[in-house]
Amino acid sequence: MMSKYRFLLKLQLYNLFGINKLIHSHDKQERQRFLITAGLGLTAALIFVIYTAKFSSRMAKAGLAGAIPTIMVVLCALSTLILTFVKSTGVLIGLKDYDLVMCMPVNTIAIVASRITLLYLINLFLGSAAMLPSCILYVIYVHPPLSSYFFLLGALLFTPVIPMVFSLSLGVWIVAASSGTKHSNLCSLILSTTVVLLIVFASVKTQFMDMTQITDLGRALADAVNKYYPPASLITRALSDTDWGSFLLFLLISILLGAIFTGIVSHYYKALNTAVFSYHAGRKYQIGTLKASSPFMALYKKELSRLTSCTIYALNSCIGIVLLFVLTVIAVFFLPPALKRQLETQEIKRLLANLMPLALSLFVSMTSTTAPSLSLEGKNRWIMCSVPAPSRTIFDAKIAVNLTVILPVLYVSAFLLRIAFPLSGIQTVRMFLIPTVYALFISVLGLFLNIRFPKYDWTSEYYAVKGGAVSVIAAIMTGMASSLIPLYLCLVLPQYQMGIILGFPGFLLAVSIVLYGNICRTSLYM
């Protein structure tokens, strides 16, 4: 079994990072795609490392170095929980190569173990970015005994296991709960979005602390983590008291949970995949009148159907605009009175009124259904290339779907914020107009990048939407940078605030027009 497990894991790693193509392919575009993906991934990891290192350094200088490992354990657990959840059904269950893999002389436990190990390695990389700098600073400031080095290494290796198992369990439960319904994909999307929003809502609620807690933030967080997340308390006791019992208990719980989950999923693996690939017909079928529509409208409906039928596509592409609406509702209806009074000062009100359009644009720039839309055509892309419509109509339909996702939610959120915060007429216009420009920009940019870097040879939608998808990573990072950079410049250069607020959207609008012209000249039939 171990040889088959290692073989399957190696195949998974080659497929995830495109190493096999990089070695055996002589296509320059394939090598460029790999280098761009690697560069973007390393850049994101470096930013995360710098952020956690600065946070840990400030805690250490404030005399809270002993609480650093506890805080880093929970940060690693939260990132693992969310990232694993949004890709659980796309990597573990519902892969397009399921029939091919099941025809191989391997048992289900080797298949499941290899896929779970792949997720573990991804989360270990992300967890190391969060924990390794903090562990180094902890050693520098605390000078712990030799046994603590072993404890820190164990925490680094095993912290992702428990949240990963919990998150995968939620994903499997959602598949099992929704697979028996007629609209299983829609049910899975609703349940998945609900879980993510509950996690976000809980995270936001923990930020509303009184002044006493804020003055002792590190200690308050450490106490809360140790109280509500037992694995973190075990690591804390192991480091502070050199408690080998607590450390071994942490390792035992992590290993047992991982083994039990692997065994249970392996037992029901065939049944879960059968449920995912099953189609449920209605009880009655009646022949009705054939409805015809224009090529654009037909393609637009097809794109909307594709969005709602793929959970990982909808969840990853639309979560930014959903978060905007949720945070808007929290800010308008659930803002603590103390914080609301602070926001009512004249200087803060003026700053909010000017920067609110860019803040809304940040969430808009995280929403791009167009970035993976061409890649998701996969082996059926010949249909897209053979429809009796010009390429421009296909591209317009994909752009229109992204605008349909963004603009209604954006305008409702902006309207609620306009009611909650007093704004002048010109400020209100800017709050609606500037994010609209960003919506156009991210829609066109995502499609432009997907045309340049398509990924048709995927075995799961996850690889088209997240795993190694250059167009998605580049579109989201570029979009977020286009809103974060002017936000930062407005804060450090307040004397040029109006020029920055109006100049950046104007520049992005011009870029969108140029990119759209390039897209319209692109043919899908090549």
Image (tube, rainbow, N blue to C red):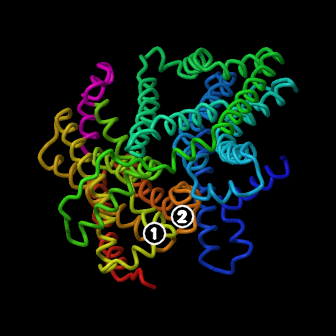
Which residue is nearer to you in this view: 99 or 452?
99
Label 2 SS: helix
On the image, the x and y values in percent for residue 227 come to: 59, 14
| Segment tinted magenta in the rendering | 332-354
Name the mark on residue 495. none
Res 79 quadrant in image? top right
Res 439 quadrant in image? bottom left
Distance of label 2 from label 1 (alpha carbons): 8 Å
Q: Is residue 381 above or below residue 328?
A: below
Name the mark on residue 449. 1
- Left or right placement of residue 285 versus residue 49 in this view: left
Contact between labelled residues 1 and 2, with CB atoms less than 8 Å apart: yes
Name the mark on residue 470. 2
Q: Is residue 370 above or below residue 184?
A: below
- Left or right placement of residue 426 versus residue 29 in this view: left
Q: Residues within 10 Å of mark 1 (few under 14, many from 20)?
A: many
Which residue is nearer to you in this view: 277 or 57?
277
Disc 1 residue type (three-letter) = Leu
On the image, the x and y values in percent for residue 211 come to: 43, 17
Q: Is residue 19 magenta?
A: no
- Left or right placement of residue 80 versus residue 12 in this view: left
